[in-house]
Image (tube, rainbow, N blue to C red):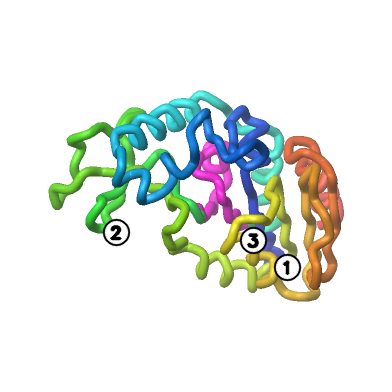
Amino acid sequence: MKKRIIVFTGAGISAESGIKTFRDSDGLWENHDVMEVATPEGWARDYELVLNFYNERRKQALEVAPNPGHLALVELEKEFDVQIITQNIDNLHERAGSSSVLHLHGLITKSRSTIDENLVYEIEGTEINPGDLCEKGSQLRPHIVWFGENVPNISIAHEMCETADILIIIGTSLNVYPASGIVNFAPRKCPKYFIDPKAEKIVLVNNLNIIKENAGTGTPTLVKELLDNA
């Protein structure tokens, strides 16, 4: 049986493909206050602004390509059972060829009903527009988990981490709750690797190996090491 590797990725791996983030700046995302475009309150205040914002982000996400970090994770599947958990809302892992990806914060290529969160749709083209309705007649919104909303997949992510033989964390500050606690669910004895230029030791986390590199360079290096020793 193949060993199971759980990979937890954040904004750093997408940033190297050219997708801009807001965590390293002053809370602005493409010159917008995140509270205007990434909260239920922002949606209630000006839903057309929110739709336009995500339409532009969606176009951007589809114009960029997976980088060496994404592609290296696909290579891991040759020898390991690889399960990816991502905070990112783009589909770069899928486009790179990864076969199992769990999105904690939703997926920008999908829309969902504003009255029934179980009604989720693939977006045809790149836009959700005012007047685009679900089958129950409500306005469609981006299928994104906004600040202040529940993260429905977090319990699934915790269960996945409990099964890890190896845990790899890539491109995240581990500062956003509840995702920040995910490392604590991995078995105490399993090797853990943290790839990020700002990576630091995490209190009470055993067997943690720090790799202070960007995702695009640190990930291929680690993948080669794991494959050579498989």
The image quadrant of residue 142 is top left
N-terminal of the pair, mark 2 or mark 3, is 2
Query: Depth-wise, is mark 2 or mark 3 nearer the camera?
Result: 3
Q: Secondary structure at mark 1?
A: loop
Q: Are marks 2 and 3 in contact (CB under 8 Å)?
A: no
Residue 118 image label: 2
Q: Position of residue 208 (x, y in %)?
A: 83, 63
Task: Name the foreground residue: 189 vs 176.
Answer: 176
Closer to the camera: disc 1 or disc 2?
2
- x%, y% of residue 11? 62, 42
Q: Which mark is residue 180?
A: 3
Residue shown at the point (77%, 75%) measured from the top left: 188
Question: In the image, what residue type sits under mark 1?
Answer: Asp
Q: For the point 64% across and 73% down, which residue is it?
A: 162
Q: Secondary structure at mark 2?
A: loop
| 3 vs 1, front mark | 3
The reply, left or right, for residue 121 in relation to residue 53 is left
Q: Which mark is residue 149?
A: none
**Dot 2: within a 10 Å radius of its alpha carbon, few (fewer than 14), some, or many (20 or more) residues?**
few
101 with respect to 107 (left or right): right
Q: Magenta stretch containing residue 99, yes or no? A: yes
- Judge the density around disc 1: few (<14), some (14-19), many (≥20) Cα neighbours within 10 Å: some
The residue tagged 1 is: 165
Assess disc 3: are there few (<14), some (14-19) or many (≥20) residues with their C-alpha within 10 Å of its C-alpha: few
Q: Secondary structure at mark 3?
A: helix
Q: Give above or below for 66 relative to 206.
A: above
Q: Is residue 187 magenta?
A: no
Q: Residue at x 82, y 55 (%)?
A: 200
Write the start and end of the magenta stretch as one range.
Answer: 83-103
Q: What's under tag 3, amino acid-wise?
A: Ser
